[in-house]
Image (cartoon, grey):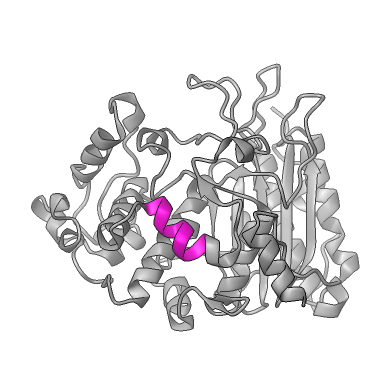
Amino acid sequence: MLLPILAFLCIAGTPCPLPARTPDSLGMSAERLAAVDRVVERGVAAAGFPGAAVVIGRRDATVLSRGYGTLDYSPASAAVSPERTLYDLASLTKVVATTSAIMVLFDEHRIALDAPVARYLPAFARGAKSRVTIRELLEHRSGLPAGRNLSHFAHSPAETRRRVLATALEHPPGAVQQYSDVGMDVLGFVVEAVAHEPLDHFVRRRIFAPLGMMSTTYTPAAALRARAAPTEMHNARGPLKGRVHDGDAYALGGVAGHAGLFSTATDLARFAQMLLDGGTLDGKRIVADSTVALFTHRSSGWRALGWDTCAGGASCGQHMSERAYGHTGFTGTSLWIDPDRGLYVIVLSNWLHERADGYTPPIAILADVRADVADIATVAADSDRAEPSEWRADRMIGWRR
């Protein structure tokens, strides 16, 4: 009776966590994993972020699911909850929404990776852009610029969309790898053209609702905004609590291929578990296992299709396998999945949130904490790996201005 009850709770809108098991029952050291508390709490104490949600899972269950600190720095702020606290995912949108939507349509033979983008978006075909392929957009090799700062001169989502499609290439297609928000926005438009519905509707219907990710959405409604961790409180657009931080995503109406998605750590754990399980969760298949393998396999430098892979260091730490894949978000979010260990690590924070005195913390605090959490998870899973005498958060290098 357990699974039907959980399915009902998800449908009813209640947060739907995965089963929880002890670390030892899944071959992980509970003693080593306990270091997560210390490093994240150090980050909070150093004002690196007001709070964070962390979920670590292995095989078919979570082994750690905790909230640290509060939603913001005000004395009356609520405590962070991995089940309830909503975070602006920023560039995690690129993989959780846009890349996943492309995976679904690829599965259905409605999108071909080596087809020109202009096959699906005729308005995109201008000069050399007519040669840009879907694969090149996914691998950030299209030649498009990193971004456009469209919020400064576009006056409506429709105008912003036209400007994105008219963006000129900075390099010949395939010649240079340059991380591009613009390219991901174009992929979002491809999804809409092929699916004949808006991007946010498609991903909710085909990915988030089937997975029971009931708190994952673009443009959150008021009830969800109330439990969001704010990014900036003194932005020119007003307090950004449950409202997208990224200016170009805002200019596109809050729904964009590169940013705009909001979610909880518990919801993202369901998404990660689906990928670890080869595209299925609770008997529901989202994509084929071969598609998961294809899109998450390193194909161009350190890039996979839409996804990044672990180069050793940064937010994935030093010890994840070469097959590990993930992504980060500018607001302070990260998701890493290591199929060799059957492991995923989710860290959500709002490091951009400023204190009342205007202090914005050094990025080193977030960088160290995210890397430490990933390393602690892998060291806890590897009984033959020596545990370091101290973590980055213990050294606190670059943590003070």
* Left or right placement of residue 327 versus residue 184 in this view: right
Q: Which residues are magenta?
A: 199-208
Residue 353 location in percent, x, y?
A: 64, 30
| Furthest residue toward bottom | 290
Residue 200 location in percent, x, y?
A: 42, 51
- Inspect this view and state whether residue 113 appears: yes
219 is higher (above) or lower (below) than 320: above
Q: Nearer the viewer, residue 76 or 284?
A: 284
Magenta span dominant secondary structure? helix
> In the image, is residue 194 part of the stretch drawn in magenta?
no
Q: Nearer the viewer, residue 292 or 267?
A: 267
Quarter of the picture holding the N terminus: bottom right
* Left or right placement of residue 44 versus residue 174 in this view: right
Asked which quadrant contains residue 140, the reply is bottom left
Asked which quadrant contains residue 76, the reply is top right
> In the image, is residue 205 part of the stretch drawn in magenta?
yes
* Left or right placement of residue 115 versus residue 32 in this view: left
